[in-house]
Amino acid sequence: MTRHGKNCTAGAVYTYHEKKKDTAASGYGTQSVRLGKDAIKDFDCCCLSLQPCKNPVVTRDGFLYEKQAILEYILHQKNDIAKKMKAYEKQKQAQRSTDQSESKSVEKEKMEKFKTNESNIVSKPINPFTSRDEQKAAGAAGAAGAAGAAGAAGAAGEVAVAGSSKALPSFWIPSLTPEAKPTLLKKPSKTVLCPMSGRPLRMNDLVDVRFTPLDPSLDRVKLLSRQERYVCAVTRDVLGNSVPCAVLRPSGAVVTQECVEKLIKKDMTDPVSGDALAHSDIIYLQRGGTGFAGSGVDLRAKEARPVMQA
């Protein structure tokens, strides 16, 4: 054979291409694919809307959001937490009333048992005018009557059990099916979490971000249509996913990480506003990656599918 096609079945070796093709067509096994540049958001896009930010804000962990989008998210989470807390309180009140009714029924059973035991203690008076033989005969007659009554009660109980056993197999009848207890709700947390990092998020933690446009004369529409839109506020280097960036909390200016290491950390002063900086005032932006292996971001997506087992 001089020619080899992708669908060639004459080979004696099960090739990698054939195995990959059969795995994709079978519907089983975990599939993984590497994301390209088109599947990665730009550094100036919101993590929720995936669109370029108009009024960007950044969290302490460096995740960029549109101000309106993140405020709506926080409001939605607070309403959801209030709804869950209301349902939890309702369940707690219902459980409290159930416990009270059960405790009352237990006390009532104890009282009835106490009354029964007290009534059994009272003995019948002995007639002094009867002989011992007559008393023994009366006791034997009473014992026989009690045994007969117990036998009748046992027979009635067996009949009842037999009747109930005949009714129990009809489990498909709605009146005889067991009732499922409602799932117990856990007390919800009142803390709003960041949708990206999962850490607590407050409105006071959001810092306004001010990007420096490459050409201040361009309006927003023309600026967004360009690939290179923003530059560093100090060095005027072009910003992008391949350039690590940081936000200075006092001024909100975006600078490159190289500028932070070589210039700003020497005197720890904000070059835009002139305020003193602490290490917590320098927020490093989270990048979306560039599609290359050296971007430092995991760019492989996996889909777990059913697995065939022998």
Image (cartoon, rainbow, N blue to C red):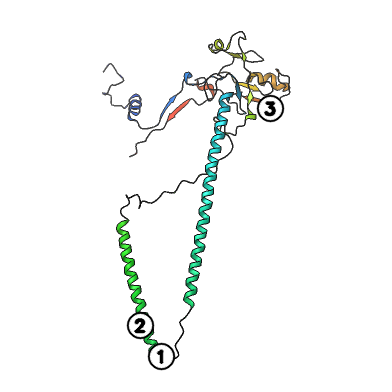
Camera-nearest residue between 18 and 102:
102
Camera-nearest residue between 41 and 195:
195
**Hey, what amino acid is under mark 1?**
Arg
Question: Which of the 4 quarters of the picture holds residue 309?
Answer: top left
Q: Residue 138: horizontal and vertical position, in percent?
A: 38, 85
Residue 243 relative to residue 267: left or right: left
Classify 207 as above or below 154: above
Q: Mark 1 or mark 3: which is in front?
A: 1
Query: Of callouts 1 and 2, which one flags the residue occurring earlier in the amino acid sequence?
Result: 1
Camera-nearest residue between 277 and 101:
101
Q: Residue 222: horizontal and vertical position, in percent?
A: 55, 10
Residue 100 relative to residue 302: left or right: right
Q: Quadrant of the N terminus?
A: top left
The dot on residue 141 is 2
Question: Which of the 4 quarters of the picture holds residue 226?
Answer: top right
Where does label 3 land, which residue? 279
Q: Residue at x 60, y 14 (%)?
A: 230
